[in-house]
Image (tube, helix red, strand yellow):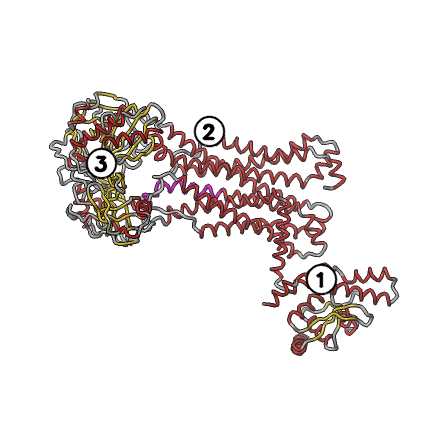
């Protein structure tokens, strides 16, 4: 539990959008997916997750709908919109550029 | 945009939705844990704990949704209103403190703005100057000019224009009923110089002060007269109005803002040998000093040519119209401005005290809110909203107070104090400024508890009491109290000084007895033979004597204590004075002296028959006798008065006197009458029979056996029996006139300062009370503990009392030093010094007594509490 990473500022949107690419998911599910896919390294705070979800919805990148989970529990499901898909592409390329640039800076320091 | 509005509308549904969403999250988590093998209760609990603070997450999520600030503002406002109504004492204290501060400051600043900064509607008003002159070491008097002198003066290079005027009550006929009209007779260039276009029609023009006497008989109406006499009728232009003996054609109406001389109407002034009031306008760019130097030479010239010799030493002084007319108000308004500023400071200090104190009371509440998830920024915002609500409510009260107060001030301003053509209205800029200042003060005051709170953090509030911030608060409070007490002392001292001046004025010896004397105004239709006038006046006098309750009746030109500068005339006394000096002149009937009860010091008053046959006799006052005949006997001496020599057709109904002899024989000396205002000693004065000069308007003084109230109607009937055409203006009693003209200004000042001081005292009392109350409530537990351990109530009481009174005493000390610093610069403006043992001592006592009461109430409550209840409940 102690060596978990906090999600980098600004990358949460990307992770959420990316998670939703595989299909609609509810808040709990999104958090879980990010955790498992990161090999339990990334911990998404609920205090960041829900504001982020609502912000993305306000931007029109995702939309929400009440539905039933596999365990027949009620939950609010989020789905990527067309604009969201475009945004995901933009954020992904931004991220790659960012990683490359930071990497270059770090290398030059070595 | 629409979406936002829609969100706003669907707010509650959205909130419910979010709540459900978060609950669902926890439910899923719990379900998963259940499946992983936890027991049901534990699963639910862990899921909840793992999720974190749901309220806070919901709050933060909501922040994302919509125009949050708007939403929160609404929420904060509602909350603020709820908390305020739950604490009406606090709310009222703060709002009233604010409102009074803003209102008083705005009203007075507006008055000052109107009177000092922008009083006149005239073009180039800053170049219009009043000329005064002084001979030898004598005092400065306004220069009077004849038409010839005015014509000469226009040659001065520094001058743009010279205007002359005269103002008088004159005879008129209103719908066939004889009436009086206040007429300004103006040289033809007056309208041009003042540069105010007429509302309707035209004005008379040209430099007609040089023209001959056959002027076109025209008249220009003032707006007020047009409204009152003609009911604003559109077709007055071209109609005629009778003024004295001539029909004048109305050619124009001036706008409302034009109130030159406050006259009813304006007619052209004919050129003659009489001296007139004058105003000069400097050429642009000419300095007052340069103009003064040039005009001095001219004025000197006026004195020498006619062989009067003169002492040669004439000094000239020029003052701008603004400074001249507002001069006597400057000092009053300046001090008043200081007073309301102090009041605003006290008010703001009060609000700070209340807000800081309240912040402390609410520390527990705020700490709880922090604990359950409110962010600090959120709480800060909410506290600020609360102080904003208070400030705004205070602002609204302030606007109301400002308008009411200004109306009261204007209504109270005695006539004669405020220049007649000035205009005062609330200055919106000032109002906005004062409100902004107050709101900023409120925000600053609201911020301090919020910041203290964020410094003390969670732990301090929820559990016990934080001692550190308590000490900080106590220091702030002590400082604010100190400031309030100091300011209050200064205001009390100012009020004391104003009151002492008032008492000195009302008790000053007048030299006559103004009680039970009614005053009526009379105008004569003219032109008339002075001989006839004498007879006519005698008939009026005897008609008045027939009225029941009347003891004696006298006629006079000027009032005993004229509200404006007394009328003066150059005098020539063989072997004593060559005509360069001036004395006050009064044209009166012989009964004047007995009617107002002026004592005779030597000689006699002229007789009935001397009055009738217009004998050249006169009576002088004691000051004149002392000044001109310090060792000799003035009785039997002869003097020559210019005013008699120069008497020509005035156009106001008086007519040329064939005064073949201007020499007057002095037959008596009477006691001094205050003839130059109530503050200054009497000037040398000569009284001559009123029949010597045919006056256009006179005053009828009627002494009655009782109060002079009810004789007006009967007197009018009696006078109408003599002449139905005779207008008679019921004025008031001599005492009322004195009160209006002389005492009113000081009474006005005294009431303003007393009101300021009383307000300051009340506000300071509220401040002290709140401070002590707050300090006591913070230490309630400590006191309870000590009392239960055996400390006596008296000891606790003494402790609170001493520490509070110490602060008040310190504040008084501060106030005393302020007065000590201020009284010198202010002494130049006020008649009574601020530094007077009597008023300072009484100020101290007043503040100490009020302070005592304000301290004792909360202190007593603390000392008499039930310690066990406090300790048990922790309240």
Q: Residues within 10 Å of mark 1 (few under 14, many from 20)?
A: few
Residue B327 is a magenta residue: yes
Disc 3, SS: loop
Dot 1 falls on a residue whose secondary structure is: helix
Mark 1 or mark 2: which is in front? 1
- Is residue A5 shown above or below B401? below
Kindly identify which residue carries mark 3: B524
Label 1 marks a residue whose chain is B
Instruction: Provide residue B228's location: percent of width, then percent of height.
Output: 33, 45
Residue at 50% of width from left, 50% of height from top?
B435
Quadrant of image for the N terminus of chain B: bottom right
Per the image, the residue denoted by label 2 is B838
Element assignment for label 2: helix
- Chain ID of residue with mark 3: B
Q: In the depicted view, which residue is nearer to us: B24 or B613?
A: B613
Mark 1–mark 3 distance (CA, rounded to whole Å) = 90 Å
* Disc 1: which residue: B16
Q: Is residue B841 above or below residue A66?
A: above
Q: Is B735 displayed left or right of B786 in the figure?
A: left
| Nearer mark to the viewer, of 1 and 3 | 3
Residue A100 covered by magenta stretch:
no
* Magenta-tinted stretch: B322-342
Relative image position of residue B531 (x, y in whole percent): 15, 31
Q: Are marks 1 and 3 on the same chain?
A: yes
The answer to whether residue B320 is visible is no
| In this picture, residue B333 sits left or right of residue B49 | left
Q: Which of the two discs, 2 and 3, labels the residue nearer the N terminus? A: 3
Distance, label 1 to label 2, CA atoms, is: 71 Å
């Amino acid at each position: 539990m102690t060596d978990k990473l906090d999600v980098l500022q600004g990358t949460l949107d990307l992770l959420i959008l990316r998670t939703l690419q595989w299909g609609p998911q509810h808040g709990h599910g999104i958090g879980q997916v990010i955790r498992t896919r990161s090999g339990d390294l990334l911990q998404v705070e609920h205090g960041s997750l829900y504001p982020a979800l609502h912000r993305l919805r306000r931007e029109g990148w995702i939309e929400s709908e009440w539905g039933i989970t596999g365990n027949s529990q009620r939950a609010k499901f989020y789905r990527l919109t067309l604009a969201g898909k475009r945004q995901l592409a933009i954020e992904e390329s931004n991220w790659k550029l960012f990683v490359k640039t930071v990497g270059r800076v770090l290398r030059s320091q070595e | 945009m629409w979406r936002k509005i829609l969100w706003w509308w669907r707010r509650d549904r959205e909130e419910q939705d979010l709540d459900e969403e978060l609950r669902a999250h926890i439910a899923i988590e719990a379900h998963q844990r259940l499946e992983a093998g936890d027991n049901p209760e534990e699963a639910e609990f862990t899921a909840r704990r793992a999720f974190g603070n749901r309220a806070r997450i919901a709050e933060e999520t909501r922040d994302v949704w919509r125009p949050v600030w708007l939403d929160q503002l609404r929420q904060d406002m509602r909350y603020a209103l709820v908390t305020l109504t739950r604490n009406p004492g606090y709310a009222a204290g703060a709002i009233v403190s604010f409102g009074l501060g803003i209102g008083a400051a705005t009203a007075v600043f507006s008055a000052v703005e109107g009177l000092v900064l922008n009083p006149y509607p005239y073009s180039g008003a800053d170049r219009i100057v009043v000329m005064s002159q002084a001979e030898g070491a004598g005092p400065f008097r306004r220069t009077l000019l004849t038409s010839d002198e005015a014509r000469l003066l226009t040659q001065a290079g520094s001058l743009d224009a010279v205007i002359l005027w005269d103002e008088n009550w004159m005879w008129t006929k209103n719908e066939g009923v004889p009436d009086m009209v206040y007429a300004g007779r103006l040289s033809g260039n007056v309208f041009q110089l003042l540069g105010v276009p007429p509302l309707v029609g035209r004005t008379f023009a040209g430099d007609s002060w040089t023209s001959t006497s056959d002027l076109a008989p025209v008249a220009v109406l003032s707006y007020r007269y047009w409204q009152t006499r003609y009911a604003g009728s559109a077709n007055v232009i071209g109609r005629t109005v009778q003024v004295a003996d001539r029909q004048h054609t109305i050619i124009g109406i001036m706008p409302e803002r034009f109130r030159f001389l406050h006259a009813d109407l304006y007619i052209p002034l004919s050129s003659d040998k009489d001296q007139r009031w004058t105003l000069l306008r400097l050429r642009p760019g000419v300095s007052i000093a340069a103009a003064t130097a040039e005009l001095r030479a001219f004025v000197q010239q006026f004195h020498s040519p006619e062989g009067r010799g003169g002492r040669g030493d004439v000094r000239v002084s020029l003052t701008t119209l603004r400074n001249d007319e507002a001069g006597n108000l400057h000092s009053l308004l300046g001090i008043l401005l200081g007073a309301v500023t102090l009041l605003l400071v006290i008010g703001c200090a009060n609000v700070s005290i209340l807000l800081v104190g309240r912040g402390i009371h609410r520390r527990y509440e705020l700490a709880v809110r922090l604990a359950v998830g409110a962010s600090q920024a959120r709480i800060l915002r909410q506290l600020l909203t609360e102080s904003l609500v208070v400030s705004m409510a205070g602002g609204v009260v302030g606007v109301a107070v400002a308008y009411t107060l200004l109306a009261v001030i204007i209504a109270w301003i005695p006539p004669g104090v405020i220049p007649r053509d000035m205009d005062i209205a609330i200055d919106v800029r000032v109002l906005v400024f004062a409100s902004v200042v107050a709101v900023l003060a409120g925000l600053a005051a609201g911020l301090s508890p919020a910041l203290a709170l964020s410094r003390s953090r969670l732990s301090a509030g929820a559990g016990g009491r934080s001692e550190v911030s308590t000490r900080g608060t106590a220091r702030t409070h002590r400082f604010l109290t100190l400031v309030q007490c100091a300011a209050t002392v200064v205001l009390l001292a100012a009020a004391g000084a104003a009151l002492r001046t008032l008492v000195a004025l009302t008790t000053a010896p007048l030299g006559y007895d103004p009680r039970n004397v009614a005053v009526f105004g009379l105008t004569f239709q003219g032109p008339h033979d002075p001989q006839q006038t004498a007879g006519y006046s005698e008939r009026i006098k005897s008609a008045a004597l027939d009225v029941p309750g009347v003891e004696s009746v006298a006629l006079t030109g000027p009032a005993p204590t004229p509200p404006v500068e007394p009328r003066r005339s150059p005098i020539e006394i063989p072997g004593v004075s060559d005509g360069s000096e001036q004395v006050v002149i009064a044209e009166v009937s012989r009964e004047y002296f007995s009617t107002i009860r002026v004592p005779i010091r030597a000689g006699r008053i002229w007789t009935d028959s001397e009055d009738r046959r217009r004998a050249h006799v006169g009576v002088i006052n004691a000051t004149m006798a002392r000044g001109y005949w310090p060792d000799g006997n003035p009785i039997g001496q002869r003097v020559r008065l210019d005013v008699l020599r120069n008497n020509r057709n005035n156009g106001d109904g008086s007519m040329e006197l064939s005064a073949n002899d201007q020499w007057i024989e002095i037959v008596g000396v009477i006691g001094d009458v205050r003839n130059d205002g109530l503050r200054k000693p009497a000037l040398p004065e000569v009284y001559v029979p009123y029949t010597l000069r045919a006056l256009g308007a006179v005053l009828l003084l009627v002494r009655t056996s009782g109060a002079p109230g009810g004789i007006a109607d009967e007197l009018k009937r009696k006078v109408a029996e003599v002449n139905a055409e005779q207008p008679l203006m019921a004025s008031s009693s001599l005492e009322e006139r004195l009160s209006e003209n002389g005492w009113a200004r000081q009474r006005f000042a005294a009431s303003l300062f007393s009101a300021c001081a009383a307000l300051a005292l009340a506000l300071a009392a509220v401040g002290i009370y709140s401070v002590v109350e707050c300090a006591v409530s913070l230490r309630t537990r400590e006191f309870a503990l000590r009392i239960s351990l055996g400390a006596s109530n008296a000891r606790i009481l003494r402790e609170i009392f001493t520490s509070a009174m110490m602060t008040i005493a310190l504040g008084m000390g501060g106030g005393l030093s302020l007065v000590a610093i201020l009284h010198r610069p202010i002494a130049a403006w006020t008649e009574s010094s601020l530094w007077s043992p009597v008023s300072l001592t009484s100020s101290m006592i007043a503040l100490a007594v009020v302070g005592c009461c304000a301290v004792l109430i909360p202190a007593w409550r603390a000392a008499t509490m039930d310690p066990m209840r406090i300790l048990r409940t922790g309240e």
